[in-house]
Image: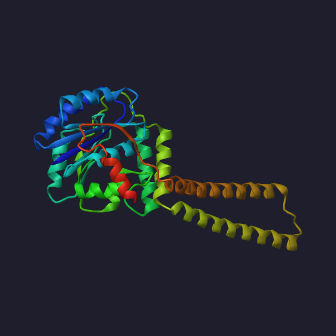
């Protein structure tokens, strides 16, 4: 297989026929030996019925139905586990990623790159979404001492070697672009146009984005713990200075501090202690979830897949 295209499907059911048409037109300009992997992540719009029809009409379309909603990143992992192409494209199903850009991604990869990312020159997202994304990547870059471009998206093409190494990492909290960037290899970038969503709105609301950001930050970096320790040391130093000042004032001026300052100090220190315990608790919770070694996803049905146990077997081999 020359090229595999992995697409997580959640919402935007109406876009699937148009997505398939544009994908096949583009891929046939590159090779006749390709596969399109559509991963239905328990879409509430019953996108599975459309995927079934596409699988029936074209054996090069592989349909994976998840047993429940596992999230976009794990749906991508499932598609990658089942993929067989020498080159693997990852993209969204809402046609904000233009299928025609795959040709440019592939041509750029032929220049000697192991992975090529699409960079959205002008994002067709809400200002709030763009702002939150920029803030997260700045914070993540600080926490990991790295440099990450918020304009990069999941839309990319990677070699089989890169995908194999990515699939070997079975952490619970995942981020596709961040993991690929972390692995190194020879990476390239091309600028692409970002289209409007074909229909509807993204299911990723502000709350979900904040939860995902916290999960990624606390699972990929321990800098929050180190900053908490440093903050505790600074507060201890400030407290020592305040206590020393109070003692000096008492013996020099016989001034007894009021209760208000004492109560304020108690509340301040109590809040900092509870916050510190909460941060430590988040890290312990991550450890608790990881040591269970539960499967990252469960495939209920696989259509046109050459080996319906490919993903489960690879998962077991990677964890052994």
Whole-percent x and y of residue 144? 43, 61
Q: Quadrant of the C terminus?
A: bottom left
Left or right: 79, with 86 as reference point? right
Location of residue 109 (image quadrant): bottom left
Return the residue nearer the eye: 114 or 274: 114
Measured as percent of width and height from the top left, residue 153 is found at 32, 47
Judged left or right of residue 230, residue 130 is: left
Q: Is residue 13 visible?
A: no
Q: On screen, 98 above or below 251? A: above
Side (left or right) of 84 relative to 72: left
Q: Is residue 189 above or below residue 51?
A: below
Examine the rendering and report whether any part of residue 1 can be seen.
yes
Q: Of 232 and 159, which appears nearest the observer?
A: 159
Q: Nearer the viewer, residue 303 or 233?
A: 303
Write down the quadrant of residue 316 in the picture: bottom left
Residue 42: x and y in percent read 39, 33
**Picture residue at 51% right of the left edge, 40% below the top:** 207
Q: Position of residue 230 (x, y in %)?
A: 59, 67
Q: What residue appears at the point 55 percent right and 57 percent down from the top-left corner?
A: 283
Location of residue 47 by image quarter? top left
The number of numbered discs placed on residues in the rendered structure image is 0
**Residue located at (77% from left, 72% from top):** 244
């Amino acid at each position: 297989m020359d090229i595999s295209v992995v697409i997580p499907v959640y919402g935007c059911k109406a876009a699937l026929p148009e997505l398939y048409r544009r994908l096949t037109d583009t891929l046939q300009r590159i090779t006749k030996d390709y596969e399109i992997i559509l991963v239905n992540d328990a879409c509430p719009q019953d996108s599975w019925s459309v995927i079934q029809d596409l699988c029936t009409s074209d054996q090069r379309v592989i349909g994976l139905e998840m047993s429940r909603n596992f999230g976009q990143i794990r749906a991508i992992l499932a598609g990658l586990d089942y993929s067989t192409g020498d080159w693997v494209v990852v993209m969204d199903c809402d046609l904000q990623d233009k299928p025609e850009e795959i040709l440019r991604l592939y041509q750029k990869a032929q220049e000697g790159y192991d992975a090529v990312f699409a960079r959205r020159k002008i994002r067709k997202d809400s200002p709030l979404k763009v702002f939150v994304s920029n803030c997260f990547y700045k914070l993540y870059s600080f926490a990991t001492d790295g440099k990450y471009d918020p304009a990069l998206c999941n839309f990319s093409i990677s070699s089989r070697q890169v995908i194999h190494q990515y699939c070997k990492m079975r952490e619970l909290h995942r981020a596709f672009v961040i993991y690929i960037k972390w692995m190194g290899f020879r990476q390239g970038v091309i600028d692409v146009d970002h289209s409007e969503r074909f229909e509807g709105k993204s299911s990723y609301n502000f709350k979900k984005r904040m939860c995902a950001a916290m999960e990624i930050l606390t699972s990929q970096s321990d800098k929050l713990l180190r900053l908490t320790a440093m903050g505790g040391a600074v507060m201890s130093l400030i407290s020592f200075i305040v206590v020393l000042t109070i003692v000096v004032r008492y013996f020099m001026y016989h001034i007894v501090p009021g209760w208000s300052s004492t109560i304020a100090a108690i509340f301040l220190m109590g809040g900092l202690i509870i916050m510190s315990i909460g941060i430590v608790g988040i890290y312990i919770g991550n450890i608790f979830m990881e040591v269970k070694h539960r499967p990252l996803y469960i495939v209920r049905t696989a259509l046109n897949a050459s080996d319906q146990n490919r993903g489960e077997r690879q998962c077991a081999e990677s964890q052994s």
